[in-house]
Image: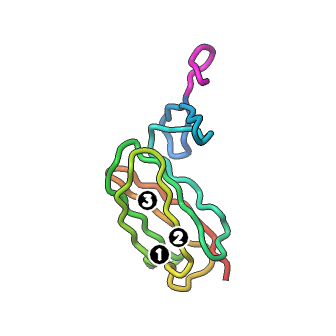
Amino acid sequence: SITDRITAAEAYPTLGGVANLGIDFGTGLVASTDFVLDQNNPNPVVDRTKIAFNLPEAGQATLTIRDVQGRTLMVREIEAAAGQNVIDLDRSELRGAAGVLSYTLTSGDFTATRQMIVLR
């Protein structure tokens, strides 16, 4: 279990702020009540990759993928659930792009960007 008995049960996301923590014994993953955009997996991408993110409440989310010149390669609108969400991405959706790409998730006032490597 996680308690505040000795130290505060909180995490510090890279974008700042404080995230509350809990344990989900069904999956073994740490649950968060904050916005989180995870690194895609696997990275580098050969054929397929998954992008996971967490939303504090259900709502509309937009995933945008761009190349290094800033050209938009893909936009996907998602009706996301509260909690953990996973987007399965096939390389064919990236219009043949390779190299370092950035992906941005936007939902409400939240926006986060990460980078992925797509192999030729």
- Disc 1 from disc 2: Cα separation: 19 Å
Q: Which residue is mark 2?
A: 89
Kindly report which numbered mark, 1 or 2, lies closer to the viewer in this rendering. Answer: 2
Secondary structure predominantly adopted by residues drawn in magenta: loop
Kindly report which numbered mark, 3 or 2, lies closer to the viewer in this rendering. Answer: 2
Residue occupying the point 53% across, 32% down: 21
Amino acid at the residue labelled 3: Leu
The correct choice, above or below, for 41 with respect to 53 in the image is below
- Disc 3 from disc 2: Cα separation: 14 Å
Q: Which residue is mark 1?
A: 70
Q: Are marks 3 and 1 in contact (CB under 8 Å)?
A: no
Query: Which quarter of the image is occupied by the C terminus?
Result: bottom right
Kindly report which numbered mark, 3 or 1, lies closer to the viewer in this rendering. Answer: 3
The correct choice, above or below, for 78 with respect to 85 in the image is below
Residue occupying the point 60% across, 72% down: 48
Judge the density around disc 2: few (<14), some (14-19), many (≥20) Cα neighbours within 10 Å: some
Residue occupying the point 36% across, 58% down: 61
Rendered location of residue 22, percent (x, y)? 54, 31
Say which of 1 and 115 sits in front.
1
Magenta region:
1-9
Residue at the bottom extreme of this rendering: 96
Q: Earlier in the sequence, mark 1 or mark 2?
A: 1
Q: Earlier in the sequence, mark 3 or mark 1?
A: 1
Residue at the front extreme of this rendering: 26
Amino acid at the residue labelled 1: Gly
- Disc 3 from disc 1: Cα separation: 15 Å
Say which of 15 and 78 sits in front.
78
Q: Secondary structure at mark 3?
A: strand
Q: Which residue is mark 3?
A: 105
